[in-house]
Image: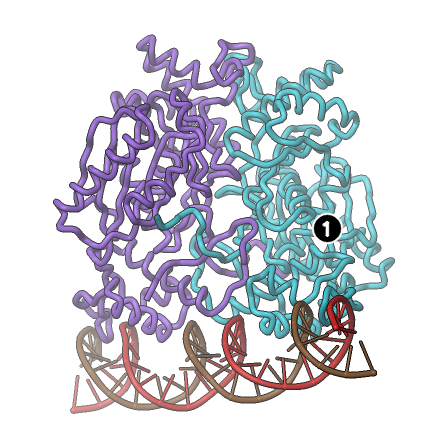
Chain colours: A purple, B cyan, C red, D brown
Amino acid sequence: MRPVSTIGAGPGTHPGANLAALRDHNAALVLGLLRDAGERGASRAELAVRTGLTPQAVSKITGRLRESGFAAEAGRRASTGGKPATLLRLVPGAAHALGVHLDRDALTVTLADLTGAAVATRTAPLAFGAGGDAVLGAVAREVAVLLAEAGAPAVLGAGVAAPGPLDHRGGVLHRVTGFPQWDGFPLRDALGERLALPVTLDKDTNAAALGLALRGPRDAASFAYLHLGTGLGAGLVLGGRVHRGARTGAGEFGHQVLRLDGPPCPCGNRGCLEVLCLAAVAAGDTARAARLLGVGAANLVRLLDIDHVLLGGRTVLADPDAYVRGVRAELADAVPVGVVPGGERTVVEGAAELVLAPLFGRAGSAATALHPDEATRKG
Amino acid sequence: MRPVSTIGAGPGTHPGANLAALRDHNAALVLGLLRDAGERGASRAELAVRTGLTPQAVSKITGRLRESGFAAEAGRRASTGGKPATLLRLVPGAAHALGVHLDRDALTVTLADLTGAAVATRTAPLAFGAGGDAVLGAVAREVAVLLAEAGAPAVLGAGVAAPGPLDHRGGVLHRVTGFPQWDGFPLRDALGERLALPVTLDKDTNAAALGLALRGPRDAASFAYLHLGTGLGAGLVLGGRVHRGARTGAGEFGHQVLRLDGPPCPCGNRGCLEVLCLAAVAAGDTARAARLLGVGAANLVRLLDIDHVLLGGRTVLADPDAYVRGVRAELADAVPVGVVPGGERTVVEGAAELVLAPLFGRAGSAATALHPDEATRKG
DNA sequence: GCACTTACGCAACACTGTTGCCAAAGTGGC
DNA sequence: GCCACTTTGGCAACAGTGTTGCGTAAGTGC
């Protein structure tokens, strides 16, 4: 069977739902709950309560998942007054995904199992400006070594995280700052052909945000991943879904104007957060950089009403406490602020999730649930 | 039958999908397409192509819609080489919804048919500070007169648009600026009891945005409705859905900091867009107010990658051309800018859509579609 | 030892969209 | 006028979903 969710929403597609879509949706949902349950596992009865389906339906669905090898029984839980529950668990090794992080000066590839855990990782220096063939060759080489070392497991596909701007839907790079020669390069299809695997391309910040979203609880998660490195960008997760915007352009967090008539920015405006912030970083004034980041974060939190803010990127990770302090001060306890738990690996692991997320009904712009609207009440 | 979509995504609910959910989803989808088709109507074959369902399934679905009175046959289209298509149309009068716009100094109520068109509208002065009983009484009175004049049609429910902040999910008002006595008032339930109707409460800007979203094409629509009146707020539609945030707090567009260390704002920060903008308005400098609005809009467009910007609110409507010019100048043709077509009525009509939208699978935070993800391609 | 609770499967069922086939109603070539 | 062809749409049988009703397994508590 193929427990890939077909749930999603996009223009120009066919939104009608048939029985196959229904089945896949529920299968992805259950698989996602099993993933969230992790080592603990979950009983059929518990899954029934969480999904709203009948226990019998859950039995059928989990039966299919077990038959296909994605789930397995794993002991039983102590009784709570009746028959003890039989636990079901996701089988992590049932499938794997590749994550590829293309950065300006480095290439990182990782092999993740179904839970998203990295099984093996390799990093190599990269000259991103060396052109398409050289970069694709480097990726193919590193991937080959990685897979050989891991014993050539079955791989579902590869997720690629790259600096923006780029087009997620079409899988094409745009004019990456500092590397104009990449403009228009069909990275997804080119790499897909090279690896003979399905490939998904996304911005590094979006990949990171997706990975972080999958580590949290299903739905509800609304947060911003703020990435401060050579540039300043954001990955947005709104209502559990990565928000990419119509042209994968969302997340241009660094080019909000914070000081009218401030210093000019390469983007054409004056007083952008990025110029101000990078200037403070260059001057060694971390506290000021952090406060500026905080002002921008506060603007974002107010505009989107998100739940929390996560900071990442090389500059932040060099002095995480200072940045958290500064941002927290500006947010005035409106929402919690933290540093990404994965550190530098956040982006690669997120890249692998580009492949895994659809299995659990967590595709980026897609919906994750069906339920009656609760905002209406009969008087 | 009950063609109400049960599609949606929210925390703590039951995301499992069963046959009833499937049926309602498809019924809402077809009904939505019929609404979009308007006077033109649509043939079964056309609906089949648009939904991706088989013609036979569409026949069954439209059969149920016709039986329940929501749709009807309406002549036939000229042949294109075969049997001429039988057109189906939404029956606008099959159901109605009430829209209520509570403003600081005025109350507007409207009766809308299924297409969202206003059948009758009444406006009355309102002392919003007079307290719960007085305001509820005024609403009930105006609604009674409106319904009597319209011949007491069947009404599905009432949508209420009010100044924020408020809680959409719980239907409770919060500390409305200038009227602290409303804090915690359960407006949805109180009015629901008074009118004996289901009631949905939302921020005025969100209601307006929803109404505008339903006038455009299905899905894809990503835009911001910027409302400049006594305050400055925004209604956000991202990927066809109203984005309300976790606590209906999204849209605080006016309190983004645009000038570090600028003049203080009642919100506690300095240099908020709203203070700067309202100051320019008070000084009669419309051009400056428009440019400031444009800078804020540009920040928003870059952050969210939306498709277009619509301006509304009393201040804008007093001199629409000037504001469109100013905002357009700052956006540098990145996205189109326009004024809301409905003028002052935008909010009330949007309020009625709070009731109607779910019928067409267009509920605020809900998903609208099921389809395979297109961002992955096999190499 | 017995009543009760909880977990879960089997079988029959209701209802969804799908498939195969056919009728209706036009156009266009001869 | 006739016939082939296209397009629309319905009828009937079908496959497959989750649901319902009921029975069984396996514990707890008195």
Q: Position of residue B343 (x, y in %)?
A: 77, 37
Rendered image quadrant of residue B84: bottom right
For mark 1, give the secondary structure: strand
Q: Residue at x 70, y 65 (%)?
A: B43
Q: Residue at x 41, y 30 (%)?
A: A164
Q: Is residue A183 visible?
A: yes
Q: Residue at x 71, y 57 (%)?
A: B37
Q: Position of residue A195 (x, y in %)?
A: 28, 45
The kind of residue on which mark 1 rests is Gly
Label 1 crowd (10 A; few <14 / some 14-19 / many >=20): many
Q: Residue at x 49, y 71 (%)?
A: B19
Q: Which residue is mark 1?
A: B99
Camera-nearest residue between A154 and B241:
A154
Rendered image quadrant of residue A52: bottom left
Horizontal side of B234 relative to B319 (left or right) equals left
Depicted A312 relative to depicted B169: above or below:
above
Depicted B331 relative to depicted A13: above or below:
above
Q: Position of residue A171 (x, y in %)?
A: 42, 40
Q: Position of residue A303 (x, y in %)?
A: 53, 32
- Counting every numbered tag in the picture gives 1
Depicted A377 relative to depicted A122: above or below:
below
Residue reaching furthest to the right? B149
